[in-house]
Image (spheres, helix red, strand yellow):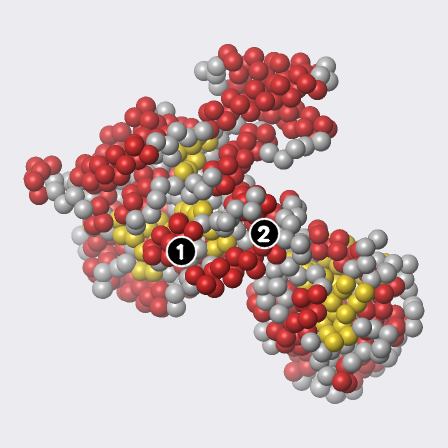
Amino acid sequence: MAAKPDAELAALLEDALYNERKRLEKSKDESKAEHEVLERLARALVTDDRHGRIDAACELVGMWADEIHGRFEPKMYRFATRVLPRALTGLLSSKPSRFRDWDLSPDRRLKIHGDLDLLRQLCKESTLILVPTHLSNLDSPLIGLALHQAGLPPFVYGAGLNLFSNAIMGFFMHRLGAYTVDRTKQSLLYKDVLKDYSVRCLTTRHHSLFFPGGTRARSGAVETKLKKGLLGTGLVAWQEMLEAKRPDPDVYVVPLTLSSTLVLEAATLIDDHLAELGKQRYIITDDEFAEARMVASFGRRVLDLDASIVAHFGDPLDTLGNPVSKDPIERHAQAIERRRYVCDRDGLVQRDEQRDHMYTDRLAGEIAAAFPRGAHVLPTHIVAWVGWRSLELRTNSRDPFRLVRVPPEARRIPRAKFLERLGKVMEQVLVGAGAGRWHVDLPPSPSSVLDVAIDRFARFHKTRAVAAVGDDIVVEDPKLCMYYRNRLLFANPELNA
Amino acid sequence: MTRMKIGILGGGRWGQALARLAQAAGHDPLVAYRDKAEKPPHIIPSTNDPPRVAQECDLLIAATSASELRSAIKLARPGPGNRVIIAGRGIEPGSGLWLSQVVQEECDAVRIGALAGPAPVDEILNGGLCAGVVASPYAEVRALFTTGLHSTRYRVYESDDLAGVQLAGAFVPVLATLLGMATTLRGAGVGVHAMVVARGLEEGGRLAKAIGARPETLSGLAGVGDLMASQATTAHPNFQAGVALAKGDRSQGPRAIAETIVKLARASRVEMPLTEAMVEIWKGLDPLEAVQGLMSRKATKEHG
């Protein structure tokens, strides 16, 4: 946290006091120590006691820092990377009766794309920030698996406090490099502490992972609006390392697009999205992820499938959003040239918060543009797209609230008609993929795409997004259909059924 | 005050005028010209080596026409340390790109701004007083330009509405042409003149809002200010293009920019009847018919 003038500091502390008191009023299990620190801070603010104010602020910041701080243990990581991927994929296998036949190879389930050689090289010569799309609470362990499978080192990442509530999960998450983010703490001071923590991680060469969407995408769509708070810490860390004349100051940002056949929490998330068109709950603590039985069921029925999840690492960017060269000599020249974005003619770093905000805006724009390029169109997405489009055509409306209430008899589409529409959309999707705007992982014919999707939709959710009934295709659960269809929103203007 | 070296790309009269304003503010301009015909008088330091200008000056002002900006930037090759201010007219004809996008396409500079407002070049070269607005999302770029050019001869106002200032820079010449045409048409008088100014700025404001710019930018120096300067003298090139248009000469005026604005408006679902009428006139519609068409439109609210 940069040194602040007295008045600014007082305003920051008043904001912290107000927000923390409000938060503590709502929560009942907070420690006595926190109440006491807040009382001391309140007294110091009222009496204008500068030293008391600073002491109380330091105590509060210290408490938060202790809560945030991850406890990465190399031994635990080595153990986990040796055992967990196989254990996880084995555990998730749906063939418990044929124990010996388990295919324990994780790379069957998780397909990884991207220039991994370049990323492995960049890990050695710089600090990386991985910015994935975010659909599910299962994303963090799956990304851990993807990193391991890609031969990349561990990344530290911020995980919501609610995810640590499970003792076993919390134990592993802490020791595998997760630090704690409490999204109920809304004060600017807490956010500053989090950002500072991230800067410290980066300047000590810990590769980091942020979910720039901030939370799981409620609608199922690829994120277009990104949060810039933590994202901007890469730029700050780079400047700090330049000031320290470090030989390896560069920080690069790698977009990662995850594409999933099914999403564990889809039903809850889409409900929340529709409610959010009113008001968002933001932190969901009672979704499918909170039920161990549901997670296990999801694992057995979905993650066991071949290529049920695709992780696509995009091309690396610098902290201003510029592309990073694959050629080491050119990359070195870029690194020197890039300093002029923040240094004066004498090579001295010129700090400028407003400029850095704009640079981070630019970076966020480039990441948002990179996400669709790494997206893989899967059978469930495209079939849901056609299902939803069929509802739109049937009702002559695009109002989602009307479409989710279409009566069952109006949600039946003759299979031949559905396949005709699907074929048309597949052609358009393939054109976009050919132009490099996204990727496709689809069986060759519309009927096989439809069959695969119907099989997938029947695997986990209580209701099916799209199902086959006799000679008809039925949009059984319009909300789920909307959720999976939303994954292709980035291609919206180009897809017409 | 530290003397600053200010690079100016383009040795034409607008480039020279900006160089003189930099001198008036106590700084050292360095003008990059392309050929002898463009070489400024000796009183203004100049070179025909544009990359040198980009290397020696942190602040670069591109004083070229919109159609020449791309080649000027390619020649000078501004880098990450440069702050580039575009002193041209908003949109590149042909590509339809904002000039700030053109700069970003052609070089590594990202700290970009635009200058707009009345630019009576002859008056400035003769020591006249004037004002302009510099817009950039980067506060330091605005501050650097203000330090470089603000003086008792030239007042610089700052804005963070880069899109609005670029839109105004592109749109005002279209309106000025329309004014030139309107005042020449048989039967047109003060009423038509006033209507074009007020309704023109209204439709420009609608487009500004739709593209995320601020409508009030059109009411400032970049909009009203520039429009006043364009029609205060009948010798203004855009006004003259309008006069020629009224007489059937369709070869002059900012047709490409008007067409781009109409495309942008359609994509943003904004009605711009005056600009659309101008485009139709350039395509061959009789101006009187166009005016009749405009006058017979349904009654509507003044704003919104």
Vertical placement of residue B75 versus A218, above or below: below
Quadrant where the C terminus of chain B sits is: bottom right
Residue A363 has which mark? none
User: How many marks do you count on the picture?
Assistant: 2
Does residue A153 show up? yes
Point 91% across, 64% down: residue: B129
Residue A308 left/right relative to B80? left
Give the image location of residue B253, x and y in percent.
73, 80
Q: Earlier in the sequence, mark 1 or mark 2?
A: 1
- Residue ID for mark 1: A314
Point 35% across, 52% down: residue: A120
Does residue A384 show up? no
- Residue ID for mark 2: A359
Q: CA distance from mark 1 to mark 2?
A: 20 Å
Q: Amino acid at mark 2?
A: Tyr
Viewer-proximal residue, A186 or B231?
A186
Viewer-proximal residue, A398 or A179?
A179
Q: Amino acid at mark 1?
A: Gly
- Mark 1 element type: loop
Give the image location of residue B228, x and y in percent.
84, 67
